[in-house]
Image (cartoon, grey):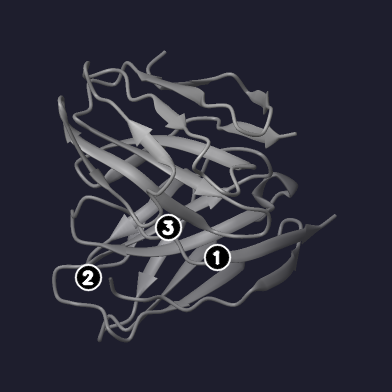
Amino acid sequence: DAKTTQPNSMESNEEEPVHLPCNHSTISGTDYIHWYRQLPSQGPEYVIHGLTSNVNNRMASLAIAEDRKSSTLILHRATLRDAAVYYCILNWGAQKLVFGQGTRLTINP
Amino acid sequence: DGGITQSPKYLFRKEGQNVTLSCEQNLNHDAMYWYRQDPGQGLRLIYYSQIVNDFQKGDIAEGYSVSREKKESFPLTVTSAQKNPTAFYLCASSIAGRWFFGPGTRLTVL
């Protein structure tokens, strides 16, 4: 499974944008980039995913580098409810998601 | 509402006992999964099933067993052979590249 690298933790302030980076230098041409987040004592929830082009949805935006070796999850205006562990995962439609350690995001009021 | 339900939310077990964790989904998804999460760690795959009556071992299957007799149900049995069963267990299903997770069961072995 292709590996991703994320910072262990990040901190931001409420109502400010947050940029969560992910490196995936061994990504293959068919790997999709997925982002999930997990609030304390809950199951992970889907945030966004993409292949090559930047993607937007109501939760976040995903910016993918032109060489696809890195990507950034953008929360445009963080709230306290966005405090969670964010996982960047590569998957090509295979049978399993492989989770790394993720980035623990803290939001300061 | 469509989704995944897991029961119970908290489960206590004496050492040496088998215990079965329930997972039900009404999303009509073929694929289902069981993950284990230890404190401060990411999720690790225990078993997965792509279709009824078929399942495969994940990365940490030892000491666990599953069945998939119905599309909507994928129970996980934690056997006495599992050396360190205390953990948070998550069930998931997937379709078209998206995964949906249940709320989890926290198992504690006393």
Secondary structure beneath disc 3? strand
Q: Position of residue A93 (x, y in %)?
A: 18, 54
Circles 3 and 2 on the same chain: yes
**Residue under mark 1: which chain is it in?**
A
Disc 3 to disc 2: CB gap under 8 Å? no
Quarter holding residue B12: top right
| Res A102 label | 1
Q: Which residue is mark 2?
A: A52
Disc 2 to disc 1: CB gap under 8 Å? no
Quarter holding residue B28: top left
In the image: residue B51, left or right of residue B85: left
Q: Position of residue A50 (x, y in %)?
A: 28, 61
**Residue under mark 2: which chain is it in?**
A
- Residue type at mark 2 is Thr
- Lower sequence index among marks 3 and 2: 3
Name the one closer to the observer, B27 or B70: B70
Circles 3 and 1 on the same chain: yes
Write the residue at 60% across / 60% down. Answer: B41
- Lower sequence index among marks 2 and 1: 2
- Residue type at mark 1 is Gly
Secondary structure beneath disc 1? loop
In the image: residue B10, left or right of residue B82: right
Quadrant containing the N terminus of chain A is bottom left
Q: Which residue is mark 3?
A: A35
Observer-side mark, 3 or 2, equals 3
Secondary structure beneath disc 2? loop
